[in-house]
Image (cartoon, coloured by chain):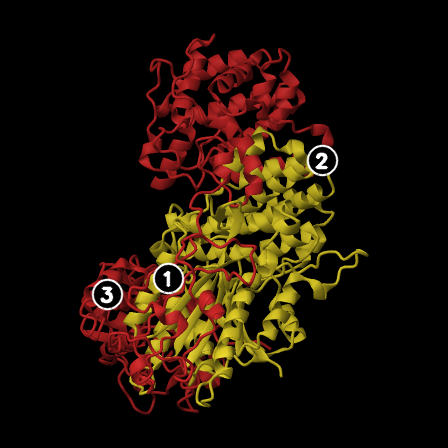
Chain colours: A yellow, B red
């Protein structure tokens, strides 16, 4: 404690604002968190000072870099470099990720460019980013390590199941970063639901947006988690084989797409299919054939759409012209039966670097903290998991413009956007989703929780919002 | 207001808890009935409204957390053994042949007691929600408000109450799902997902396919190792193309038909090409049931997309390539630290030019043999054998500046990288080596020149990207070297950083040698070579620690890791 006071003196300029905020922080010695946190009680105090001073240093460093103030930036980077090894405790790992991102940021700032000297490069190499390329089975394991993705899967599966009840033809559009990892459980729950019924399960047409980037002839993945051999045909064969074994008729189509054009290829594909099925219907006079139900499942995908509009001629930024809003409107025009939106409940849209550093710190401690509860420091899986978080932190902090793709928005703002695009919220809480999610959470560490906010479900870690799940239908 | 639906910390093994509690109750009730006058309910059932106050006349006991959790309130004066209940102590005293006294059961004087949770915010803090027995409230308190210190080694679940943990240990691993490939899963969702992508299923289907009428693909899930649920995929008759089309619609517009049937070319459609050429990937379908059940079996006309029904469907797909990152090829070094974003590759290129990519054989004609050996050792270590190019980021030579504890977590830490070349001059101790280095360094950066020289000869990357390498060409270098090392902590800057660093080093103590470095760097900061001497000191530190590793420079890290593991 003594050290902490001494330590924080020199940077008291902004200290008050920082200290006044009550912040969620791992290792904060409150009764609940100290009991839950895996760190031994011995170093709770240590953690406390650690986390706070590290955060202050990071914020100040970001400020210095923003002000083109190279000397303090350099000094703080140096200090951080020494207190935050990338394989330390959770706080140190978190700080190390930010340190890395800040160094990269500094390297892009003219005044701070010289910071990219041997020290920082050494740091960078120590903190090197090694995005793992998952095999199919590894990825299947990986997404189930924590409820981070699984929460959205489980919640979405149960509302989708309700939405398609009684329909015989379903078109599901899957926009997800996890390469169809949700689909097996969806198929399984459809199969289970129709088990023993006279009515067969619906025919499912699945259109999957494959997040890729075309550079010349080479198609690359752009977002973690990544595949080792990226072949959606292998994936497709397996999924269809699985569906067959479950007695569900599945038609699979992967469409390479990118958020930079607003998933245009996926929208086109849906339009094409709608046109075709409508054509069929108009030529067919039997009344019993119903129209295909369209379900759009967006799992952590929409925040990659830019929320700012390209500047119009007069440099007037019109929010409605942003890729994000335009996509939602285009989606609305397809008249989907249901749109499921699962997103990380955090705000990274600030233009201000320091603001983003703060929100990122207040959010990304969570993944580092969660893996610490069940994976050892040397664990490979932890390494992979954290590397993906490193990637995100780097993206939020050191990139700008089109390269900055991690543009999460809080739940309320998504809800507003959806309403603006003429959608309305569907209650998530009435059906079986709550029970399903709770059962799923029981299989994970005790820090995970479920919260109901308005009509939506929110996954929490030690009481802090992590991911929300919400569902919409057209409002008219 | 958000309603908290979280109930995840309630015991998952309710059944076994119950038995554990009542078992304890049974043994106690031999002597004492005071606490056990009502049959124990599982105190922590999920329905919270159950444990209400059973008897309004009961005496409400409020214990402080300390008293509540005290295990030994009643201590034997002979052997100091502690007991939770006086009754038990009395029984124990009997063994010492001490006078003992048990309270006699007397229906009159026994007043029922209920206990409330000491945690003010807890529902059970309210007397109307008090729990009926001491054990129950203790367990409740531990579970809900206590530390979970019992951890299952198998699945890492943690428990606050030892009996919960024991109950879990008994059943852990028995409730699991087993894929045909032999992998076990404790969670259904993981199992399902694995199952879908596992080759075992594909093989099984392949086996079943020829007899396609064989009606079932079974998936076995073993639960509790006795019940075996069989999920049977409903019989799928040999797929006649199912009629999703109205029978009255034989002619399909040729245009559509063409759209429907993508050319079986595996080439990806260009991303930019919009509608008319649909981003074709995979169209194939399986239609097991529809035809038979849909009641339109008389319709023989296939749906367009269903032209290829015989399973397994031939995939006509876009192959989203790119197993390997672009950036690593850019950075022209043998290290594998690749960044997802291409933009960072330049950074890494400079980064690794400094350290890695050392040709296996070094020019041994270095002016200073001792030092070059020293460097050789380093570089030998630094350079992974060519067949292991993808192993972790290579540590740069400048590592002495960065935290010496801990290699990158992203490094493989595999044994193959930990092969240290034996010190070329075993006789030369680390201290001697250090002295030598210090002598060199004393005279204004010759140490760095040595370092720089070696790193320039050894580096195949663009050496100009590394500052020290280029410095080394110029004869005069003492102060630039200093700043390029990032050691130039200008004291006149006056700012808090100075204190800050001091604070740090004292705060983190000697367990992090780099912090000594910081402190020393500060101390020496006045002299132009301050950074340099600090550098040397730091090396000395490291080397002292790593005395066993003798001349192996990276010994610091190595030993640090080892101790970390042992402690």
Which marked residue is nearer to the observer: mark 3 or mark 2? 3
Q: Residue furthest right?
A: A314
Where is residue A347? Give x, y as percent: 63, 61
Q: Which of the chains bears the disc numbered 3?
A: B
Tell me, yes or no, if residue B15 can be seen here.
yes
Q: Nearer the viewer, residue B113 or A394?
A: A394
Q: How far apart in space, not on screen, are marks 1 and 2 (Cα)? A: 50 Å
The residue nearer to you, when weighing B282 against B97, is B282
Mark 1 secondary-structure assignment = helix
Residue at x-position 45% and y-position 46%: B322
Residue at the image point whose x is 39% and y is 49% from the top? A228
Which residue, given by chain and number where applicable, does mark 2 sit on? A111
Q: Are marks 3 and 2 in contact (CB under 8 Å)?
A: no
Please tell me if label 1 and label 3 are on a single chain.
no
Identify whether B304 is placed above or below A112. Answer: below
Q: Are marks 1 and 2 on the same chain?
A: yes
Q: Are marks 3 and 2 on the same chain?
A: no
Asked if one can make out residue B431 in the rendered structure from this viewpoint, the answer is: no
At a point 74% along the width and 56% down the height, the residue shown is A311
> Which residue is label 1 attached to?
A236
Please give the label number shown on residue B205: 3
Sequence-wise, which precedes: disc 1 or disc 2? 2
Q: What chain does mark 1 sit on?
A: A
Labels 1 & 2 near each other (Cβ < 8 A): no
> How crowded is the residue under tag 1: few (<14 C-alpha within 10 Å), some, or many (20+)?
many
């Amino acid at each position: 404690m003594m050290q902490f006071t001494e330590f924080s003196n020199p940077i008291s300029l902004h200290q008050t604002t920082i200290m006044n905020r009550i912040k969620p922080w791992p290792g904060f010695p409150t009764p609940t968190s100290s009991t839950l946190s895996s760190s031994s009680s011995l170093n709770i105090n240590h953690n406390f000072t650690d986390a706070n001073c590290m955060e202050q240093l990071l914020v100040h460093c970001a400020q210095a870099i923003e002000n083109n103030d190279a000397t303090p930036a350099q000094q703080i980077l140096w200090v951080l470099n020494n207190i935050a090894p990338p394989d330390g405790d959770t706080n140190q790992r978190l700080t190390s990720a930010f340190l890395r991102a800040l160094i990269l940021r500094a390297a892009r700032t003219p005044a701070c460019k010289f910071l990219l000297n041997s020290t920082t490069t050494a740091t960078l190499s120590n903190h090197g980013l090694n995005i793992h390329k998952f095999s199919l089975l590894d990825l299947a394991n990986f997404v189930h390590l924590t409820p981070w993705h699984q929460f959205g899967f489980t919640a979405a599966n149960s509302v989708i199941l309700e939405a398609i009840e009684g329909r015989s033809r379903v078109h599901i559009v899957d926009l997800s970063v996890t390469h169809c990892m949700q689909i097996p459980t969806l198929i399984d729950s459809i199969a289970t639901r129709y088990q023993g019924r006279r009515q067969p399960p619906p025919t499912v047409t699945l259109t999957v947006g494959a997040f890729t980037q075309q550079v010349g002839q080479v198609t690359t993945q752009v977002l973690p988690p990544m595949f080792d051999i990226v072949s959606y045909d292998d994936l497709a064969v397996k999924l269809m084989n699985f569906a067959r074994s479950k007695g569900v008729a599945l038609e699979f189509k992967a469409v390479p797409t990118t958020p930079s054009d607003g998933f245009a290829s996926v929208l086109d594909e849906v339009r094409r299919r709608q046109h075709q099925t409508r054509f069929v219907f108009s030529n067919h006079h039997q009344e019993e054939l119903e129209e295909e139900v369209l379900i759009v499942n967006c799992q952590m995908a929409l925040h990659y759409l830019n929320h700012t509009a390209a500047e119009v001629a007069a440099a007037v930024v019109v929010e409605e012209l942003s890729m994000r809003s335009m996509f939602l409107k285009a989606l609305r025009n397809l008249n989907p039966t249901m749109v499921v939106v699962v997103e990380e409940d955090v705000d990274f849209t600030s233009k201000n670097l320091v603001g983003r550093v703060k929100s990122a710190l207040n959010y990304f401690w969570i993944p580092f903290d969660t893996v610490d509860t069940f994976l050892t420091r040397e664990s490979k899986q932890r390494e992979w998991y954290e590397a993906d978080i490193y990637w995100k932190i780097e993206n939020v902090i050191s990139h700008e413009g089109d390269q900055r793709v991690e543009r999460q928005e809080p739940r309320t703002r998504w809800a507003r956007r959806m309403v603006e695009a003429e959608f309305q919220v569907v209650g998530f809480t009435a059906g079986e989703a709550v029970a399903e999610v709770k059962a799923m959470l029981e299989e994970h560490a005790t820090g995970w929780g479920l919260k109901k906010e308005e009509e939506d479900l929110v996954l929490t870690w030690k009481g802090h919002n992590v991911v929300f799940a919400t569902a919409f239908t057209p409002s008219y | 207001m958000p309603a908290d639906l979280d109930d995840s910390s309630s015991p998952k093994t309710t059944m076994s808890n119950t038995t554990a509690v009542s078992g304890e109750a049974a043994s106690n009730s031999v002597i004492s009935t005071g606490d056990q006058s009502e049959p124990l309910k599982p105190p922590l059932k999920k329905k919270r409204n159950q444990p209400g106050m059973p008897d309004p006349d009961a005496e409400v006991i409020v214990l402080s957390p300390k008293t509540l959790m005290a295990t030994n309130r009643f201590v034997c004066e002979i052997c100091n053994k502690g007991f939770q209940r006086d009754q038990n102590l009395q029984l124990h005293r009997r063994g010492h042949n001490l006078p003992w006294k048990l309270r006699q059961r007397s229906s009159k004087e026994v007043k029922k007691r209920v206990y409330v949770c000491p945690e003010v915010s807890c529902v059970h803090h309210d007397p109307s929600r008090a729990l009926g027995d001491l054990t129950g409230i203790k367990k409740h308190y531990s579970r809900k408000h206590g530390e979970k210190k019992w951890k299952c080694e198998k699945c890492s679940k943690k428990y606050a109450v030892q009996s919960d943990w024991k109950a879990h240990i008994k059943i852990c691993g028995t409730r699991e799902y087993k894929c045909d490939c032999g992998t076990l899963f404790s969670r259904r969702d993981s199992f399902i997902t694995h199952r879908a992508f596992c080759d075992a299923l594909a093989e099984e289907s392949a086996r079943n396919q020829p007899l396609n009428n064989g009606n079932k693909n079974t998936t076995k899930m073993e639960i509790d190792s006795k019940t075996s649920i069989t999920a049977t995929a409903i019989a799928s008759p040999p797929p006649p193309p199912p009629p999703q089309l109205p029978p009255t619609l034989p002619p399909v517009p040729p245009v559509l038909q063409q759209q429907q049937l993508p050319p079986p070319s595996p080439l990806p459609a260009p991303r930019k090409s919009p509608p008319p050429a649909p981003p074709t990937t995979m169209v194939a379908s399986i239609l097991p049931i529809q035809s038979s059940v849909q009641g339109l079996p008389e319709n023989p006309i296939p749906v367009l997309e269903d032209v290829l029904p015989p399973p397994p469907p031939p995939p006509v797909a876009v192959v989203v390539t790119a197993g390997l990152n672009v950036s690593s090829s850019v950075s022209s070094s043998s290290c594998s630290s690749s960044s997802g974003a291409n933009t960072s590759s330049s950074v890494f290129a400079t980064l690794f030019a400094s350290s890695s990519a050392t040709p296996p054989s070094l020019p041994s004609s270095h002016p200073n043999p001792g030092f070059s050996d020293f460097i050789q050792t380093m570089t030998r270590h630094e350079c992974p054998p060519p067949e292991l190019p993808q192993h972790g980021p290579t540590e740069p030579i400048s590592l002495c500046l960065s935290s010496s504890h801990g290699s990158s977590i992203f490094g493989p830490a595999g044994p193959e990288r930990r092969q240290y070349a034996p010190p070329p001059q075993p006789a030369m101790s680390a201290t001697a080596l250090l002295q030598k280095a210090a002598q060199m360094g004393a005279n204004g950066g010759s140490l760095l020149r040595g370092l720089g020289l070696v790193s320039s000869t050894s580096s195949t990357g663009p050496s100009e990207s590394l500052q020290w390498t280029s410095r080394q060409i110029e004869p005069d270098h003492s102060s630039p070297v200093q700043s390029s090392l990032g050691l130039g902590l200008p004291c006149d800057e006056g700012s808090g950083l100075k204190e800050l660093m001091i604070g740090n080093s004292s705060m983190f103590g000697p367990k992090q040698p780099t912090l000594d470095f910081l402190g020393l760097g500060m101390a020496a900061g006045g002299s132009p070579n301050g950074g340099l001497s600090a550098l040397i000191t730091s090396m000395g530190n490291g080397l002292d620690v790593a005395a066993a590793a003798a001349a192996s420079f990276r010994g610091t890290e190595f030993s640090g890791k080892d101790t970390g593991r042992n402690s």
